[in-house]
């Protein structure tokens, strides 16, 4: 019956969202949350998961400003919030990608390095650079008394871009997050993510207390990094997606600090 079909869709969407939270964040979810029947709903749920991460990110930043914490301590704490909330999974992808890309090896060797669990020198250098720029950007936001509301939408935008590229690029491995969460997806799932991205940008454009430029910076950087990595690795993977999300959010922070 149509009613049963519609309700089943709602239930599947909710379960897909819970699976996305359980896989890509440390936010507590029901113990028996996993259901392979709803894998196709995980990627379209990423923007909403990002919105929750962003809300918690904003809450942490606002609390530190409210209690007049020193700007340097505030910046050090706030820069770690999204990494902690995601269990460092995207940061791990960023580091693995740095090791593989800067090895300057052939494509097969890059793929091998990408799956290697050991941390190389390039990953260490890359994460130090990321930490320096992230700290400097967040410190500038606090020092300049910039609007903290941007923190809410940035993780949603970064995940919209990552989701679009994940669903519309070929996996570079036969197994992994990309293959798993692309299973059963259809063009309407990409459309949903594009609609979520448009909603975020529209909110930033028309809500007076928000600023469009950091979100545009996140979207442009995320798309550019994703396209660049797809070209150099002949496809996409969970690690490459994590790298794109990380650099997308850094671009937003730098933009927020500069404007």
Image (cartoon, helix red, strand yellow):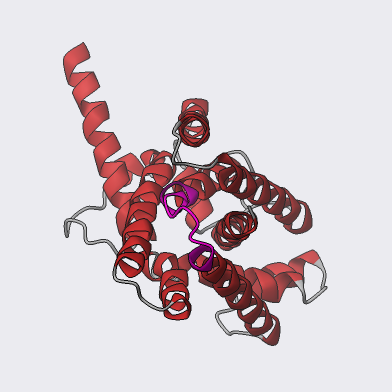
162 w.r.t. 105: above or below: above
167 w.r.t. 4: above or below: below
Residue at the location (22% across, 27% down)?
8
Where's residue 42, x and y in %? 38, 44
Where's residue 222, x and y in %? 63, 50
- Please say whether residue 146 is one of the residues in the magenta stretch: yes
Residue at the location (30% across, 58% down)?
22
Q: Is residue 197 left or right of residue 13?
A: right
Magenta-tinted stretch:
141-154
Where's residue 26, x and y in %? 31, 65
Where's residue 63, x and y in %? 30, 65
Residue at the location (58% across, 48% down)?
214
Q: Quadrant of residue 151?
A: bottom left
Residue 170 vs residue 102, the one in the foreground: 102
Q: Is residue 251 left or right of residue 4?
A: right
- Please say whether residue 53 is one of the residues in the magenta stretch: no
């Amino acid at each position: 019956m149509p009613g049963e079909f519609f309700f089943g869709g709602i239930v599947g969407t909710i379960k897909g969202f819970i699976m996305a939270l359980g896989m890509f964040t440390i936010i507590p979810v029901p113990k028996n949350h996993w259901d392979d029947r709803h894998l196709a709903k995980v990627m379209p749920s990423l923007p909403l998961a990002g919105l929750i991460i962003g809300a918690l990110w904003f809450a942490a930043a606002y609390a530190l400003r409210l209690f007049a914490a020193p700007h340097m301590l505030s910046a050090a704490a706030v820069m770690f919030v999204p990494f902690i909330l995601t269990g460092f999974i995207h940061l791990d992808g960023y580091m693995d990608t740095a090791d593989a890309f800067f090895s300057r090896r052939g494509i097969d060797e890059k793929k091998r390095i990408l799956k290697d669990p050991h941390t190389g020198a390039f990953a260490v250098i890359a994460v130090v650079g990321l930490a320096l720029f992230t700290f400097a950007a967040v410190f500038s936001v606090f020092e300049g008394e910039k609007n903290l509301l941007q923190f809410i939408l940035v993780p949603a935008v970064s995940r919209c871009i990552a989701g679009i590229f994940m669903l519309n690029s070929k996996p570079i491995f036969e197994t992994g997050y990309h293959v798993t969460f692309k299973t059963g997806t259809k063009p309407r799932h990409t459309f949903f993510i594009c609609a979520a991205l448009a909603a975020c940008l529209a909110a930033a454009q028309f809500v007076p207390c928000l600023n469009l430029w950091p979100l545009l910076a996140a979207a442009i950087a995320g798309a550019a990094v994703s396209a660049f990595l797809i070209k150099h690795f002949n496809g996409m993977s969970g690690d490459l997606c994590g790298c794109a999300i990380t650099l997308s959010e850094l671009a937003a922070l730098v933009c927020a600090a500069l404007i």
